[in-house]
Image (cartoon, helix red, strand yellow):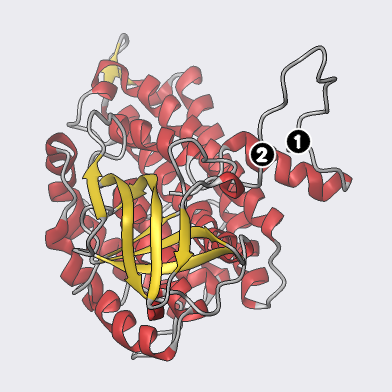
Amino acid sequence: MSRFPGVDLLELDALLTEEERLVRDTVRAFVDDKVKPIIEECHREARTPLELVPEMGALNLFGASLSEYGLPGLGGVAYGLIMQELERGDSGLRSFVSVQSSLVMYPIHTFGSQEQKDRWIPRLASGEAIGCFGLTEPDFGSNPGGMRTTARQTSDGWVLNGSKQWITNGTLADVAVVWAKTEEGVRGFLVEKGTPGFTSSDQHGKFSLRASTTSELGFHDCRVPADAILPGSTGLKSPLMCLNQARYGIAWGGIGSAMETYYTALEYAKQRVQFNGQPIACHQLVQEKLAWMATEISKAQLLAYQLGKLKDSGRLKHWQISMGKRNNIWLARECARMAREILGANGIVDDYPVIRHMLNIESVYTYEGTHDIHGLIIGEAITGIPAFNAPERPAAKKKEAEQPVAAGSAR
């Protein structure tokens, strides 16, 4: 299998530090050597490639931004490059690492007690333990503030009731970071696998993210001890902070998916001969598509790089992350479509990775905040006017308006 050479039309490698290039190249080699040989089979069989988890742990891909517990404490750009290369392999694989890092290890590290951190972070970092993040519910995706899952305090702990849906790694997880409404507002809880009243089941019939486990979580008078609460979690802003971490990585991941479909289309176009005995790459219509893809990928790289520099300087804002996620996943979606067109009938078979990326990106386009919701987040930032709430309607003429929409969905 040939090595992926990268896509760098603007000589952006010169902007990267030696460490950042080393991180990228290490993960790039891992994807080429270990992921790509098995990922189509995983997609066909709808299974998560758990055999890769120990090696990803050994490479410090879980919680790479943390510096405690022997973790590397990478900067924003280096972390983003990890997400880029993983999603070049498969969106489901990047989702696995993103959830483990940004949605499980991050909240435990940020909001957890010392005992919780000491117990879980080393095991999650090595891949010995797997985690999941429970925020989205069957009736509330883009409006997490409407959640119905509750946590009631008792004399010796908490009782959780409710359900969560579209949860990555749900049935695989040893621990779930679960968000529930309490009398004091939304709080986070660590619910361990096997806790009485805690159930999980897989979502079947997916045509997207088939190499990723997606589940529903149920809580039926689920009793957890008093020390299961994340003591530093305070309100809905806590899970939204986690989502900001994950969305940042997704903005980089979209570049990886786009690079893979673009490079596949480019190589195919140079080899596929039609009509006059020349490769289809000589035709204007094909070149225009390739030129568009290459240009947009270059622009996305610049956007993601700047987000990384803002993150490292502590100046990154949530709406800037929305801009990156919205633009770069849209780009990946368009690149997958154009690559499919260039490959013709070969674009729909898994001899090539294009159709798998095309299917996967439909999920990424929706989760962690839909394309439209991120547009509203950006819109509020530039106008100062929130547009999530529908205008009030006279009760006598129309039924009561639905619950206002909040700022993004999760998984």
Q: Residue at x 57, y 41 (%)?
A: 142
* Cα gap from disc 2 to disc 1, whole angstroms: 6 Å
Residue at image x 18%, y 71%? 55
Image marks 2 and 1: residues in contact by CB distance under 8 Å: yes
Residue 42 x/y as whole percent: 15, 43
377 horizontally vs 368: left or right: right
Position of 22 with respect to 295 (left or right) is left
Reading the image, the residue beneath label 2 is 405
Q: Where is 348 relative to 66, above or below? A: above
**288 or 82: nearer the viewer:** 82
- State which quadrant residue 32 falls in: bottom left
On the picture, is 279 further left or further right than 251?
Answer: left
Q: Amino acid at mark 2?
A: Val
Task: Out of 130 and 150, give the one closest to the viewer.
Answer: 150
Which class describes the residues within 10 Å of circle 2: few (<14), some (14-19), or many (20+)?
some
Question: Which mark, residue 389?
Answer: 1
- Viewer-side residue, 219 vs 24: 219
- Residue 319 horizontal side relative to residue 269, left or right: right
Q: Which mark is residue 80?
A: none
Q: Residue at x 18, y 74 (%)?
A: 128
Q: Is residue 293 above or below residue 12?
A: above
Q: Amino acid at mark 1?
A: Asn
Residue 98 visible, this orientation: no
**What is the crowding at mark 1: few (fewer than 14 residues within 10 Å), some, or many (at least 20)?**
few
Question: Secondary structure under badge 2?
Answer: loop
Q: Position of residue 16 (x, y in %)?
A: 53, 72
